[in-house]
């Protein structure tokens, strides 16, 4: 948690968008919350990100997004997590998944 790299997300705050000015402090390390000294509002470190207000861990969400964005997961989900994409031997032969119709 680095308050110097964080800005206040409150639209009505006069210090909105200012980083490194000393206007953001740490409100709670345990809950990862900041406080704006200008408007006195508190906000979480994940405010404005895809991880805001999630009950699932960020690691699980990142893993699911990785699996969804990887085309090969339809055929072999373990490849997206554990293996590098492979090139088969031969003249320009590359791995292509088999489509069952």
Image: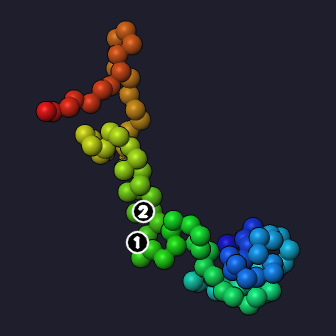
**Secondary structure at numbered mark 1:** loop
3D distance between C-alphas at marks 2 and 1: 7 Å
Where is the N terminus found, in terms of image quarters?
bottom right
Tell me: residue 37, above or below residue 11: below
In the orientation shown, which residue stands out farthest toward the bottom?
40
- Could you say where residue 28 lies in the image, as x and y percent from the top left? 64, 86
In this view of the protein, which residue sits in the foreground, 16 or 32? Answer: 16
In the orientation shown, which residue stands out farthest toward the front?
12
**Secondary structure at numbered mark 2:** helix
- Could you say where residue 7 lies in the image, as x and y percent from the top left? 74, 73
Which residue is rendered at x = 69% and y = 80% of the image?
A: 10
In this view of the protein, which residue sits in the foreground, 75 or 100? Answer: 100
Instruction: Specify whether 76 is left or right of 10.
Output: left
In the orientation shown, which residue stands out farthest toward the right?
21
Which residue is rendered at x = 30% and y = 26% of the image?
A: 96
Question: Label 1 near label 2: C-beta < 8 Å?
Answer: yes
How busy is the neighbourhood of tag 1: few (under 14 within 10 Å), some, or many (20 plus)? Answer: few
Looking at the rendered structure, which numbered label has been put on residue 56?
1
Give the residue number, with chain letter if any, for mark 2.
61
Looking at the rendered structure, which numbered label has been put on residue 19?
none
Instruction: Specify whether 96 is left or right of 40.
Output: left
First reached walking from the N terminus: tag 2 or tag 1: 1
- Could you say where residue 21 lies in the image, as x and y percent from the top left? 86, 74
How busy is the neighbourhood of tag 2: few (under 14 within 10 Å), some, or many (20 plus)? Answer: some
């Amino acid at each position: 948690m680095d308050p110097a790299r964080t800005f206040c997300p409150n639209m009505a705050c006069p210090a909105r968008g200012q980083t490194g000015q000393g206007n953001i402090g740490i409100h709670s390390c345990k809950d990862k919350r900041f406080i704006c000294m200008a408007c006195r509002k508190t906000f979480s470190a994940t405010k404005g990100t895809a991880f805001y207000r999630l009950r699932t861990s960020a690691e699980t969400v990142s893993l699911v997004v990785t699996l969804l964005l990887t085309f090969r997961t339809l055929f072999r989900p373990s490849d997206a997590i554990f293996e590098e994409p492979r090139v088969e031997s031969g003249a320009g032969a590359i791995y292509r998944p088999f489509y069952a119709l």
